[in-house]
């Protein structure tokens, strides 16, 4: 039954069908175009009021359809907490640079016993992942899997020649660092890769290792987290903190393995209050245990890169 029939609560007739045949509805703009003749000619043939009502009804209907479709396409919204699994590869070579599943790592021959393999927390809108991944997550729902490519501008950016520096080899040696091509060092708080060593000069690259490269991802949403306490627990886990939490009303009590200084507390409080609106107050209570802090320090030592300053 067409819109004209619905308006007048009658069965479709030849005039109604003829009007339908005269128009084309543009789905994504909500506008109406005419296949044959002009709007004035059609109004004259079928009656000004009836055609106007018909066009208004069609337009409003498709605007509603478009709004619903836009919501459907954007399943995740800003502030949503999701756990994801992924495999990240360099598009040109297929080389894996990051992944979250231990079995996949073993199968691909890139397993690292010092790395922890588990789903990763992402808060939509918090810039916890590259833009190319976040755009895909917005269109997905729990259980969805996707494979897609990400251009450098939506990944780690283009390579910047100005971020390649020459530093004296003596500067490294004074700080007891042996500069070897291929190793990573931290200089003035920034990570860099040593590209070459020639005589007394060390060529250091401050670009991200994946800058300028197109990437390929296999991505899956494991879970959409909606419970307040679970959100807080996952966020604290993301920051590698061994804690116990208790939620009392809108107050979150965080028990830590050792007392935290004020700067660390502020770093914890800020994202929790920003992204978990239900939590209005946070209390810290030190716990007697120390196992978590020891493991954390041990892991830090294992993964630590040489630290130095550019000028000494």
Image (spheres, helix red, strand yellow):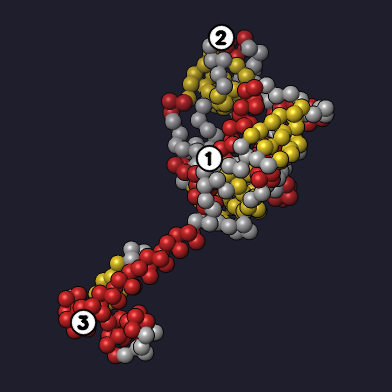
User: Foreground mark, 3 or 2?
Assistant: 3
Q: Nearer the viewer, residue 303 or 132?
A: 132
Up-down: is 280 above or below 20?
Answer: above
**Label whose residue precedes the other's in the sequence (2 or 1):** 1
Q: Which mark is residue 77?
A: none
Residue ID at (64%, 50%)? 226
Compute the Cα span from label 1 to label 3: 56 Å
Compute the Cα span from label 3 to label 2: 88 Å
Residue ID at (66%, 49%)? 227
Residue ID at (50%, 38%)? 156
Residue 59, by quadrant, is: bottom left
Residue of label 3: 47
Q: Is residue 287 left or right of residue 236?
A: right
On the image, the x and y values in percent for residue 48 come to 20, 78
Q: Nearer the viewer, residue 80 or 130?
A: 80
Residue 25, by quadrant, is: bottom left
Q: Nearer the viewer, residue 297 or 22?
A: 22
On the image, the x and y values in percent for residue 196 come to 55, 24
On the image, the x and y values in percent for residue 248 come to 71, 40
Query: CB atoms at circles 1 and 3 under 8 Å apart?
Result: no
Residue of label 1: 127
Q: Secondary structure at mark 1?
A: loop
User: Foreground mark, 1 or 3?
Assistant: 3
**Label whose residue precedes the other's in the sequence (1 or 3):** 3
Compute the Cα span from label 2 to label 1: 35 Å
Q: Nearer the viewer, residue 183 or 252?
A: 252
Residue of label 2: 312
**Label whose residue precedes the other's in the sequence (3 or 2):** 3
Quarter the C terminus occupies: top right
Q: Is residue 118 left or right of residue 196?
A: right
Q: Secondary structure at mark 3?
A: loop
């Amino acid at each position: 039954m067409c819109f004209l029939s619905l308006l007048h609560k009658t069965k479709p007739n030849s005039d109604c069908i003829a009007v339908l045949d005269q128009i084309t509805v543009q789905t994504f703009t909500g506008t109406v175009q005419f296949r044959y003749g002009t709007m004035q000619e059609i109004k004259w043939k079928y009656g000004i009021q009836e055609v106007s009502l018909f066009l208004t009804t069609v337009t409003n209907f498709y605007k509603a359809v478009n709004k619903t479709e836009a919501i459907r396409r954007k399943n995740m919204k800003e502030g949503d907490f999701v756990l994801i699994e992924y495999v990240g590869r360099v598009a040109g070579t297929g080389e894996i640079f990051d992944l979250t599943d231990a079995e996949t790592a073993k199968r691909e021959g890139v397993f690292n016993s010092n790395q922890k393999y588990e789903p990763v927390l992402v808060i939509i809108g918090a810039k916890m992942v590259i833009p190319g991944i976040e755009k895909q997550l917005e269109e997905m729902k729990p259980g969805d899997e996707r494979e897609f490519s990400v251009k450098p501008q939506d990944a780690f950016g283009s390579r910047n020649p100005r971020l390649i520096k020459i530093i004296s080899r003596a500067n490294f040696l004074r700080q007891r660092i042996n500069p070897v091509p291929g190793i990573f060092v931290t200089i003035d708080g920034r990570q860099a890769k040593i590209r070459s060593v020639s005589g007394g000069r060390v060529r250091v690259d401050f670009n991200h290792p994946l800058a300028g490269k197109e990437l390929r991802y296999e991505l899956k949403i494991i879970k959409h987290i909606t419970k307040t306490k679970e959100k807080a627990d996952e966020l604290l886990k993301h920051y590698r903190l061994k804690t116990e939490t208790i939620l009392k009303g809108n107050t979150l009590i965080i028990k830590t393995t050792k007392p935290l200084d004020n700067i660390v507390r502020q770093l914890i409080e800020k994202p929790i209050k920003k992204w978990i609106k239900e939590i209005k107050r946070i209390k810290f209570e030190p716990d007697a245990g120390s196992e978590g802090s020891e493991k954390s320090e041990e892991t830090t030592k294992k993964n630590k890169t040489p630290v130095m300053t550019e000028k000494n």
